[in-house]
Image: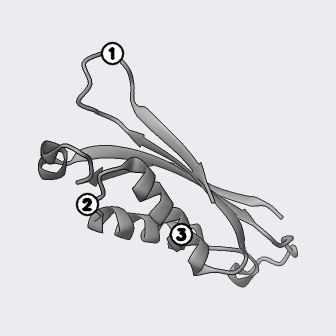
C-alpha cells in the first residue's frame, strides 16, 4: 500500500453561498491524497499503479461543472468520483482551500479537509 499525492492544484470555480461568488468566480487550491490498497510490484509499467493524470482530469471536470454552495459538497463529490474510478483505491483525502472569501479580516485562506 502507498499514497499518491497531487499538491496545490489551482482552479477557478463558480461555487459559494453568495450569488456574487457564483457569478464572479473564485480561486481554489486543492491537494489530493489517494491511498492505494495494493503493494507496488516493482514493475516499471503504468498498469502496476494508478494514474495521477486521471485524478487531475476528474477533479478539473468536477470543478468546472460544479455550482455547489459548500466546499464540503465539492470535496465530497471529488472523493466519491475518484474512488469510483478504480477498485485499487482504498481512500481519498482532499484539502480544499478557498483563497479569497467575503470575510472582513486578514488571513491567507479557508480550508476544509475531508477523507472518504
Quick check: 7 left or right of 17? right
**Residue at disc 3, secondary structure:** helix
Q: Which residue is mark 2?
A: 67
Could you tell me how far apart the alpha carbons at marks 1 and 2 are, in whole angstroms? 26 Å
Give how far apart the Cα atoms at labels 2 and 3 are.
Answer: 17 Å
Which disc number belongs to residue 26?
none
Find residue 80 and report its image quarter: bottom right
Instruction: Between label 3 and label 1, give the one nearer the viewer.
Output: 3
**Left or right: 25 as drawn, with respect to 113:** left
**Which residue is labeled 1 in the image?**
106
Q: Which residue is mark 3?
A: 80
Residue occupying the point 46% across, 37% down: 111
* x and y, in percent, of residue 1 in the image: 83, 64
- Ranked by sequence position, the earlier of labels 1 and 2 is 2
Say few, some or many: other residues with alpha carbon within 10 Å of mark 3 (under 14 / 14 to 19 / 20 or more). few
Q: Position of residue 19 (x, y in %)?
A: 13, 47
Q: Residue at x 73, y 58 (%)?
A: 3
Label 3 vs 1, first from the N-terminus: 3
Within-10-Å neighbours for mark 2: few <14, some 14–19, many 20+: some
Amino acid at each position: 500500500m502507498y499514497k499518491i499525492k497531487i499538491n496545490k492544484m489551482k482552479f477557478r470555480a463558480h461555487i459559494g453561498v453568495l450569488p456574487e461568488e457564483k457569478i464572479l468566480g473564485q480561486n481554489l487550491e486543492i491537494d489530493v491524497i489517494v491511498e492505494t490498497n495494493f503493494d507496488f510490484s516493482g514493475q516499471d509499467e503504468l498498469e502496476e499503479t494508478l494514474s495521477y493524470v486521471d485524478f487531475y482530469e476528474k477533479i478539473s471536470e468536477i470543478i468546472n461543472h460544479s455550482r455547489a454552495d459548500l466546499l464540503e459538497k465539492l470535496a465530497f463529490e471529488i472523493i466519491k468520483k475518484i474512488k469510483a474510478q478504480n477498485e485499487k483505491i482504498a481512500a481519498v483525502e482532499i484539502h480544499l482551500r478557498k483563497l479569497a472569501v467575503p470575510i472582513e479580516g486578514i488571513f491567507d485562506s479557508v480550508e476544509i479537509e475531508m477523507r472518504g
